[in-house]
Amino acid sequence: MKILKLLVVLALVGLIATFYVFELGRYMTLDFVQSQLQVMQDYSRDNFFTVAAIYFLVYVTATALSIPGSVIITLVGGAVFGLWWGTLLVSFASTIGATLAFLTSRLLLRDWVQSRFGNSLKAMNAGIEKDGNFYLFSLRIVPVFPFFLVNLLMGLTPIRIIPYFVVSQVGMLMATLIYVNAGSELAQIESLSGLVSVNILLSLALLGILPWLARGLLALLRPARTPRHFPRPRRFDANVVVIGAGSAGLVSSIIAAGAKAKVVLIERHRMGGDCLNTGCVPSKALIRSARIADYLKRASEFGIDGATGKVNFRKIMERVQSVIARIEPHDSVERFTSLGVECVSGEAFITSPWSVQVGERSITTRAIVVATGARPFVPPIPGLEQIAYLTSDTLWELRDLPQRLLVLGGGPIGCELAQSFGRLGAQVTLVDQAPRIMPREDEDVSACVLARFEEAGIRVLTGCRAKGFLKEGEGGVLTAESADGEVQIGFDKVLIAIGRKANVEGFGLEDLEMPLTERGLLKVNAQLQTLYPSIYACGDVAGPYQFTHMASFQAWYATLNALLGRLKKFSVNYRVVPWATFTDPEVARVGLSEQEAKEQGIAYELTRYEIDDLDRAIADSEAHGFIKVLTVPGSDRILGATIVGYHAGELITEFVLAMTHGLGLKKIGATTHIYPTLSESNRFAANAWRNARIPTHLLPWAERFFRWRRG
């Protein structure tokens, strides 16, 4: 491939050099062509096919090399060969030349452009793969777009060659006819600027815009194809009905109510959803108690001798419930009612794209927002049904600390809870069939967390597949298979934490034949619309990220689209998505990881800063972990950042802000950070990027300069 690229470059350089060295451009001027027009016409009459072949090759070469003068050559075609033969020759020659330029651009530049800017070009690539022919046709039909520029830019995209050729052939035909026809009057043309009238150019521009206008009009007038047809009510009880009062549903409701729309919020269980009752809030309260227990064990590190403490697991779990109770009013029926939301308790059932049934009540609505969340996924492992297993939903009912806890799953939930229970005194064994814990993160990140787990006495078995459970007393035994053979693990309690399953059953989606993704999520478009345009989905039920903050983020888009209907559409953007796993050390990330960059073939430069060198981390006896930042090669533009360490979830925010607003590492490095703080680590990471790019070859000259300055 490298040899082929070199040969193509040499050929291009040779041909372009020939054009300019021998001043071939003088043969493509209006004056020269007009002076030789009669000679060309006379010679063509006697040697038609020879002249046509030479003309064809010249046109293909000129367009393939993007040499200026295509308008003149087109005019010559009309003047020498007439309208029909001229149109035939120009049409095919220009398309073949354009395709050669397209292929050259693809061969020489596409891989480099995609590797350097691939992350930023994701949306464009997806659009080209879906509607590339439509875009190309619109560009081809309007001659005001530079012919050569379209060829070169399209070569950088994923559009296929055969559609490119066909669409170009058809799209350029109208303009070709106009210019070839103008060539019949070549002798009378005084300048190229007056060749085509303003009216003709405007007409062609209108032709190019027309497909876009027609497409938009059809989208407004033609409803999406749906499996079933439902009669649309003449009047509506509400503007929006929101199903589910978790993070996504609450945010949707409050946005709609804030806009003074009539909104009905339906929840079958508890306001606040998983995050408040069984997820984020209780788990962080438990993690805090576990950290305090760990600090008591480490008290001598801080110069405190004889510190003792006994874990009272019942009190810890009661504290967890008290934390929930304190936050609960934020998500309460009373608060949301005071904000203008009608809160309804009960099972919702979607009976049509415009109606929801709750008990005996039927509510008609202009839009429905499905925010039903997700639940822990319980795998069909033989014997599990005989075990009183725990999930992240039922764990909080415990009041006695299990002596032996088996955690099945090495993702964020499994790791957070495994470490917490280990610190509180349980003997924890964590099992996962993946080759390492936290497989979504880079290997060095997983290794850092694993080392801390092993130091704390947590037994971690990765690459280990659960085969079956056997009940034994109040607990049981897991039989698992690893590379070293079969292993049996006894436990008093088992926590199933291997993922979450979207709640898509039991409230009418099956009757609507609503399509799901391969992961079992509701299939939505960029505006978070489902198959039915009046039904939207956000949060864990829609994915692709099952985080509380992303549920709130999506809810904003889903609600605005639901309220504004067809007047204005807002597309959700996942370019900057942060998340954190609250183990110790914490792991926080935004954007690309090294693993993802390699998988996607995106070029990057890596900058790394070790937090064990940070003054505040040393003072706090938390000097561990690192920051690594991926940047565009040769630039300080951030592709992604990962932080492993104390309060990483707080520190990542600076990189989230930078990526959101297009700020590079230079800006972070030039920002004053308070000393001594953990946030200084972000500035040091940014300065590490700058220091690696100091032009060291100039330093000897600087030394000589300053020596001279000293006299």
Image (cartoon, rainbow, N blue to C red):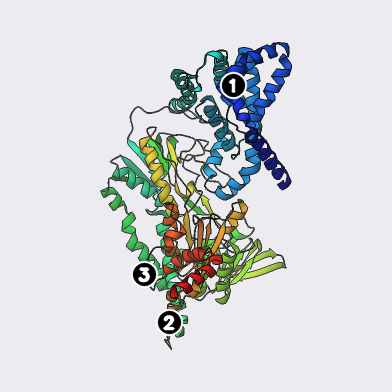
Residue identified by numbered label 2 = 309
Q: Are marks 3 and 2 in contact (CB under 8 Å)?
A: no
Up/down of 629 relative to 57, above or below = below
Between marks 1 and 2, how big is the CA–CA gap? 99 Å
Q: Are marks 1 and 2 in contact (CB under 8 Å)?
A: no
How would you rate the neighbour count of disc 2 (Cα within 10 Å): few for under 14, some for 14-19, many for 20 or more? few
Amino acid bearing label 3: Ile
The foreground one among 16 and 579 is 16
Residue 409 in view, yes or no: yes
| Of the image marks 3 and 2, the number of the one nearer the N terminus | 2
Amino acid bearing label 1: Phe
Residue drawn at x 56%, y 30% is 147
Residue identified by numbered label 1 = 32
Give the residue furthest to the left. 338
How would you rate the neighbour count of disc 3 (Cα within 10 Å): few for under 14, some for 14-19, many for 20 or more? few
Residue 57, image x and y in percent? 69, 26
Left or right: 365 with respect to 48?
Answer: left
The foreground one among 424 and 615 is 615
Residue 449, image x and y in percent? 55, 69
Residue identified by numbered label 3 = 674
Give the residue furthest to the front. 711
Residue 440 in view, yes or no: no
Residue 545, image x and y in percent? 50, 51
| Of the image marks 1 and 2, the number of the one nearer the N terminus | 1
Task: Name the element at disc 2.
Answer: loop
From the image, state whether disc 3 or disc 1 is nearer to you.
1
